[in-house]
Amino acid sequence: MPQKRKLRTPQDGPLRAVLVGVQRPGVSDEEHSSSLAELGRLAKTLGLTVVARVSQKRQALAVAAVIGEGKLKELARLTGGSGVVPTGVPTHRARSADPEPAAADEVVEADARASVVLVDHDIAPSQARNLERATGAEVLDRTAVILAIFQRHARSREAVLQVEIARLTYLAPRLRESGAGKDRQGGGIGGKGAGESHIEIDRRKVRDRIAELRRELAAIEKDAATRRHRRAAQPTVAIVGYTNAGKSSLMRALTGSELLIADQLFATLDTTVRALQPETKPRILVSDTVGFIKKLPHDLVASFRSTLEEAREAALLVHVVDAADPAFPGQIEVTAKVLAEIDSADAPRLLVLNKIDKLEEHRRATLAQAYPQALLLSAKSPADVAGLRERIVEFFEREMIEDELLVPYRRQRLVSEIHASCRVLAEAHDQAGTRLRVRGRPEVVARLRAAL
């Protein structure tokens, strides 16, 4: 079974990284710069120090090593590599962390070299290997970086399983032989039979492990689905949006819960459900969800689909946006795309432009004019949070109806359920039973009446 890939530990401080990006036709300078900046924030979340960027305009990624020969040599000067992709069968020396440099006077001092190359694209295994051989550095594409962050931040058993499934799915086609004699074929214990190579055995083990993890995850998802079914009668709100937009901060302010708040990408991977505070009648439940990001790996969306079910089944989506980020219009589009993937594109949505405390007054006025239906706020302002709470309560109040329910004395157990799922305006007792004047959602009132 392949081991989890870990970044090499430096002896003299944080690992240094170089960002690599290719600007293809149709991508503006602003979009390209924003994407690289986001990759830099992902690197920071991993604990890496970005020391340089290597960017190139091309029709497409270079087949061999993503970037052209000239840019490859420029990159190698930053990492201490040769800048040339060796031909023939890779050797340990060709893949070593300190290959033969092209020219000693052109190479950055050893203690200032970058040991990690982050590529702002999804690249083929052969491209990653060629980059490693030419630079002598560890190469991670955008998907690998995101997976590494998810792997670090996963805490609950469900999140750990989801990330591990996505990681192994990503790793399976990238397995390659390591060490001499690995390409021989054989059968025996643990082998499928004569003719199966070691890499085929490794890939089969990965597939078996993925199947095992999915079975375990299915059991956990079944329990989660049961809990969601029990909450179906209560009004629910899901907080969604781009990663690091301030969702957890708003969740904490709205519910008074002690959630992890960190200025880093994907700090929250687990769904948390809490009641809106101060509590309403009926209670409104608020859930925090995993953040989205541009080019979010498809395998991660698939693995976290059960977690995102909270968003799909919510009556209202509170879409939180970091208004202080210049790239936020593109982030709104990314969130809308992911919501469409989980069949939530048509769900009622309240757009919240967060972090306006970081904006000048004229910028706030411009945003208010451009997004008239949005709510501009700062999660740090109690008054702003109270305004958001009021908007949420108003949303559910609009669809509520009033009705009178008569609960026979033999069915008195339903009285407590009515109090939990509706707002009781009046309650009286007579010979027929308990009469309650209630205000609640139409489907809830209908369900209660049918139970009588």
Image: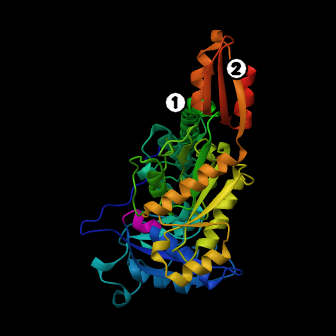
**Residue sitting farthest toward the left:** 12
Residue 75 is marked as none
Q: Which residue is mark 2?
A: 406
Q: Residue at x 70, y 24 (%)?
A: 405
**C-alpha distance separating marks 1 and 2:** 74 Å
Taking depth in this image into account, of 348 and 56 the one nearest to the observer is: 348
Q: Magenta stretch: dominant SS?
A: helix
Taking depth in this image into account, of 250 and 447 the one nearest to the observer is: 447
Query: Percent x, y for residue 121?
Result: 59, 68
Picture quarter with the C terminus: top right
Q: Is 43 contained in the magenta span?
A: yes
Q: Residue at x 62, y 75 (%)?
A: 368
Q: Which residue is mark 1?
A: 188
Helix, strand or loop at mark 2:
strand
**Which picture quadrant has residue 26?**
bottom right
> In the image, is 443 to the left or to the right of 415?
right
**Residue sitting farthest toward the bottom:** 105
Amino acid type, residue under disc 1 in the picture: Gly
Taking depth in this image into account, of 284 and 125 the one nearest to the observer is: 284
Amino acid type, residue under disc 2 in the picture: Leu
> In the image, is 34 to the left or to the right of 178?
right
